[in-house]
Every structure is written in C-alpha cells, then in structure tokens.
Amino acid sequence: MSDYINVSKIFGENVFNDTAMQERLPKKVYKELKQTIEEGKELDPEIADVIAHEMKEWAIEKGATHYTHWFQPLTGTTAEKHDSFITAPMSNGKVLMSFSGKELIKGEPDASSFPSGGLRATFEARGYTAWDCTSPAFVRQDAAGATLCIPTAFCSYTGEALDQKTPLLRSMEAINVQALRLLRLFGNTTSKRVTPSVGPEQEYFLVDAEKFRQRKDLVYTGRTLFGAPPAKGQELDDHYFGTIRQRIAAFMKDVNEELWKLGVSSKTQHNEVAPAQHELAPIYAPANVAVDHNQIIMQTLKRIASQHGMKCLLHEKPFAGVNGSGKHNNWSLTTDDGINLLDPGKTPHENIQFLLVLTCILKAVDTHADLLRESASDVGNDHRLGAHEAPPAVISVFLGEQLEDVMEQLISTGEATHSIKGGKLRTGVRTLPDLAKDATDRNRTSPFAFTGNKFEFRMVGSRDSVGPANTVINTIVAEAFKEACDEIEKSDNFAEAVHDLIKQYASDHYRIVFNGNGYSEAWIEEAKRRGLPVINSMVEAIPALTTDKAIRLFGEFGVFTEAELRSRAEIQYEAYAKTINIEVKAMLNIASKQIIPAVIKYTKSLADSINAVRAACDADISVQEDLLRETSRLLREAKTALVRLNEIEQEAINMEEGAVRANFYHDKAVPAMEALRRPVDELEMIVDKSVWPMPSYGDLLFEV
Ligand code: ADP
Ligand code: MG
C-alpha cells in the first residue's frame, strides 16, 4: 500500500459500476440493463448471460476466483456462500472459468438455518437469492482472496421475504409511485422516478485486540457485562472532535482506501463523545445502495481493525456509564432529475408543495410512531434509547423555530402570514410564507429531526441494519402521500384542497412535534399526556408489527404480507431471547470461573497478611480486617445473585419460545443480571488490580 492515496484513481475500481458496464457490455445490452435499473423493471434472462460473462471477466482481472450472492438475512448481518468460477475439469485436465446468467440472477444457498419465523416450515425449506441489479456488484479483497459479491434479495420459494432487502425494495417502489402522483398534481411532468436518499452515520468503538481477548464478555457478547467506571470518563469532552491519534489515523486511512475502492463514498470521520469512540459517514445514496454500503462499512471497519491489532465494537452499548453508539439515518426524497422534495424551495409554489410533503410526513410519523420505534429496536439499543444519551424512547419530530412558527400560524388562523427568517412574503394561495433554509440550532435530543432538507432519524442502533427503518419510513410516507393525492384528486379546486390538507394535517398531528429537550423526565410525562406511545424496550415494541393498522398498511403497499409480519415478530422475539440467553451464560461463566476465584484469592492474601502482622507485632490491622469483611460481604452478595441468575436461566430454557420467553428474559433475567453486576463492580474497585482477571474500563478506553 502506498503512503498517499489517489482517491479519484481508486474510487470505485472494485465495483462493476456504470463506467465498467459501459466499457464492457455490448451497447444494446448496456442500454437494456440501464433501463431495467432506472425503471425498476425485471431483467431479461437473455441479456443476463452476456452480463454474467462480462462481469466474470472483469472480476477475474481483479483476481477473483469465487463469486457469492451477498444477502442480508434476518440475523442483522450479511451472509454469503462462495462458489468458485471453475467448471468440471476437461479431458486435458484443465478447468474453465464460467459464470452464467442463471447463476448471476438466481442462487440457491442451502440456507435453511437462517431465521424465517416459521415461514419456511409452512412453505418451502430452502430459500433463493435474486440479484438486485440496482445495487452494483463488487470485488472484495481479503484473506479469502478476491470474491465477486453480487448484492441479492433473499426469498422463500413462494416469494416471502426472508431478508431486509426485499421489503426495502418494495417500499421504495411504493413511495416512488405515490410521490410521482403527488408531483404530477403539482404540475411536474418531467420527473420519472422518486428515490429515497439515505446517508447513515456510523458510530463505533476501537479497543486493543489483546485486551479484547482478555475480556470474555466482549468476545462472546460484544459488550462488557461487568466493569467499574474508570477514574476519568467522558466528562471533560476532551475526546470529542479531538485530534485523531496516529494509530487510529492509520486505521482510518486504510478503511477509507478500502471503502473508496468499493465505491463507498466515505466522507467524514471524527472522534465521538465517548473515549475510544469514532464516527464515519458516507455521502448519501439511494436507500438500497446505502443499506448495502452500510453493511460494507461495518465489515470493513471490523476487518481493518483486526489488521491494526484492534477490535471494532459495533455494539450499541459496549460500556456502561459512557455513551453508546447509534446510527443517524438521514433521509430525503430525490427525483431522477435532481429535485429534493424536502427542500423548502425558493418560490411560494415550491413552498406549498414542500409544506404538504412536510405535513404528510408529520401525519405519517404520528400515525405510525409505534412502527418507527419498532424499526429501531435491537437488544443492544435497549441500553441506549431513553438513557439520556440517545434519543428518548418516545418518537417525536423536531421542526426548528421557523417551521414550528409557520405551523402554529396555520393551525391557529388557517393562514401563515409571516415567516421568522424569510422576511419577505409572496403569496401563492391565500397566505403561505416564503421559507428560508432554517439555520436554528439542531436539537440533538430529537429522534426525528428536520435538518434543512432531510429528516434525520436518530434512533437506529449502531450494529443494526438501516433496512427496516427505511422500509418503515418509505411505506408510512407513501401512505400519507396516497391519502393526500386521493383527496386532492377529488377536489375541483387544487389550491384550496392543498391548503386545507396542510392545515388539517398540521392541526391533527401537531402533537408529534416537540422542539424541547427530549432527555428530560418532563417530556415523558408530556408525551403521555399527548397520547404518544411510550415504548421502553424491544419486547414492548415488537407487537407494533402485527397490529391491524400495520397489517393494513404494509398489505396495501405490498411491502409485507401478514404472514411476513408475523414471521418477523417471531424472529425479533427469538433474537431477543437468544441474545439475553448468551449474555446470561457468559455472565455466569465469567463470575464463577474468573471473578469469584480471583476475589477468593484476594481474601486469602488479606487473611494471610492479617495473620502475618499479628504474629510479628501488635500493629493496627483494622484496615486489613475492614477490607476482608467488606470483600467477603460483597462476595456473598455476588454469589447469591449468581445463584438466582442461574435459577432464572434454568427456568427460561424450558419455556415456550416467542413472546413468552422473550418477556421472561426481559422482566426476570435483565434485572437479575444487574443484581449480579452491582457487587462485582464494587469488588473491582476494592480488589488488588494485579489479581483482577480482566482489563479494566480504563485499560480498554484509554489505552488503545
Ligand atoms: P450532520 O451535520 O448531521 O453531520 P452532514 O451534512 O454531515 O450532516 O450529513 C450527514 C449525513 O447526511 C451524510 O451521510 C450526508 O451525506 C447525509 N445527507 C446530506 N444531505 C442529505 C439528503 N438530502 N438526503 C439524505 N441524506 C443526506
Ligand atoms: Mg448528523
């Protein structure tokens, strides 16, 4: 690797992107594929053979020996099965490298062990993968050599979605149809496609690999299950946006180089709030590409960290007492000819369209707050949401001073006659103000914030896919657009109809707007008064998937069938129970085999020293005695908590799977884990560091 990176030379060099396709494919095939991609049509199998052949030749030049259908099952990560290009040896003992159109567009991984929430049991045991040709294929170079990765959707044989990608693509189609309808009503005849644009900001921690290995909790669960707070935490904020240290800088340079080669436009990087915490953001891309790229980013962070003797922690809450990690999901709607529907625009006409789009989004978020909350639910995220460091567990929308003022005028008088920032006033229909780009301070505590020309959904967990969140946003906004279009089409006065809808949506759904401090206790009380759903945990969020409202919504737009929704709820419950089960087992193991023996060793050394001093002279030994008493008391407390946790674990094993078991883990196991952690963390503060069996928070966070 050279010292200096020539970005424009390497950018996208490992991607079978538009340039590569144009260079390699016959003109006619290229044109057909482009059309398929741009218009979301189905790929003609005849041209697939030609594309496959050229893609293979291109990949082999990059050193690829294998190809894989790269997919995103409901495990939260990605999956792949590698096949080499070689065919059966010929009579001369040589092999050919081949790759057919059939192999490109459809794969059959023996994937029966991926979660299906009962879907496959009732239909087909195997699933198949299908090329998502709107997300380009790429060659990944790693220890396995070079592999051609083909982004795919993963479905059952009867077409049920078994992955994150399929519903996302369906939701993108839904919003495309409804947004185009809305644009046409506003007189736009030129835009051909509306695509959700997504830019996810990824937070992560880096720790030293050797220290990581000494922490079995990190190894098995990705987070620390024990750990006393360090002498210094994040209170000085001296790490935030601080100078990036050389070891980290070298890591980031390699990450960027890898990502750029893969066409991921890694753009910003900085230190985050917590010590050892960092962030990486790419430039936004079409939602499905952004979801794929985010997975590539997470994998690349992990791989490059290992090469630098570090471990990248993507868990939402690796350390208690310091901030956890999330993923801010920036979302907007863009037409193929470059119009952003969330841009307030410069003319009153554009402003009106913008205000309708905005109030539709308010309506969507208010109506389906439970679904949005669910889309960000992840076991690790339970430690973050509502813990005064990340958005609260209540969904609300931040609009900023100017828009809030406009909304209030609309609601109270039916007209908005002035705009705080805009000043000048040009009326379109009745009175609507000119909107200038709002420069008010951003509210970091809001879960769903308008930030000038996009919404930022800040609830998603750092480890989680951004697929589900965007699937929900696209679908609920599609529904609101549809209902608005239905109304407008019925009316014979377009301007009046639009104006009335804006006012109606703003008044009916104003309760979802909150510009204050989302971390305050008062807000939770206020939210309850407003009737907003307060959903505190993942297990409480899951039922949102299967309400009549959700089944109707997703069914109407062809995003999920009822069976798919039920399967997803099952999978979520299972994921919750399994994750907590692993944490419980790891805790029991570490406490029994590492911590209790270490503490006993320490008490023995105290007792030995007491006896030795006593034998030697009549010196004061009350300190040693106090320590011995205190240590023994905490040891007793820890042992009692351990026994209790073990009993709960035994009870859980025999329990019915699904909601019952997940709730049992949440209600019983989680508090029992806390009860074990408390005395152990206290012991860590007392016991001689040299006998404590694992690196401390200080070692992990400040010695990377
Ligand atoms: P912030 O101030 O919130 O960090 P940035 O401008 O750095 O905002 O953008 C954060 C993320 O939002 C980036 O991934 C960026 O590409 C993305 N983003 C910017 N504009 C849009 C947009 N119109 N739609 C979707 N994402 C966007
Ligand atoms: Mg941001």
Image: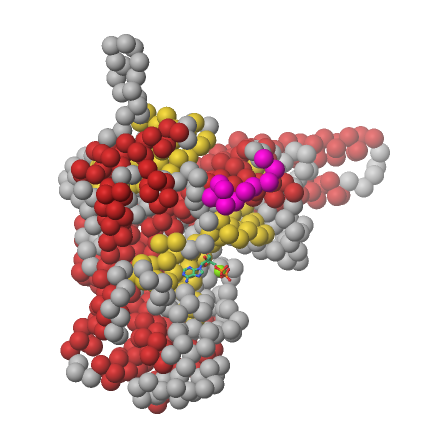
**Residue lying furthest front in this view?**
27
Of 3 and 35, the residue lying toward us: 35
In the rendered structure, does residue 213 fall within the stretch colored magenta? no
Which quadrant of the rendered structure holds the C terminus? top right
Would residue 396 be seen by someone viewing this image from the given angle? yes
Give x and y (percent) for residue 500: 26, 83
In the image, taking residue 356 as reference, residue 399 lies left or right, namely: right
Which quadrant of the view contains residue 458?
bottom left
Task: Indicate whether 515 appears above or below 569.
Answer: below
Of 648 and 704, the residue lying toward us: 704
In the rendered structure, does residue 7 fall within the stretch colored magenta? yes
**Residue lying furthest top in this view?**
92
Would residue 649 be seen by someone viewing this image from the given angle? no
Give x and y (percent) for residue 226: 54, 43
Of 648 and 367, the residue lying toward us: 367
In the image, taking residue 668 as reference, residue 639 lies left or right, namely: right
Give x and y (percent) for residue 469: 35, 56
Q: Main secondary structure of the magenta part?
A: loop
How many dots with numbers? 0
Of 471 and 286, the residue lying toward us: 286
In the image, taking residue 228 as reference, residue 48 lies left or right, namely: left
**Residue sitting at x 18%, y 60%:** 556
Give x and y (percent) for residue 613: 79, 33
**Residue sitting at x 53%, y 31%:** 593
The span picked out in magenta is: 2-11
**Residue sitting at x 44%, y 46%:** 264
In the image, taking residue 200 as reference, residue 206 lies left or right, namely: right
Task: Indicate whether 382 appears above or below 259.
Answer: below
Task: Indicate whether 441 appears above or below 264.
Answer: below
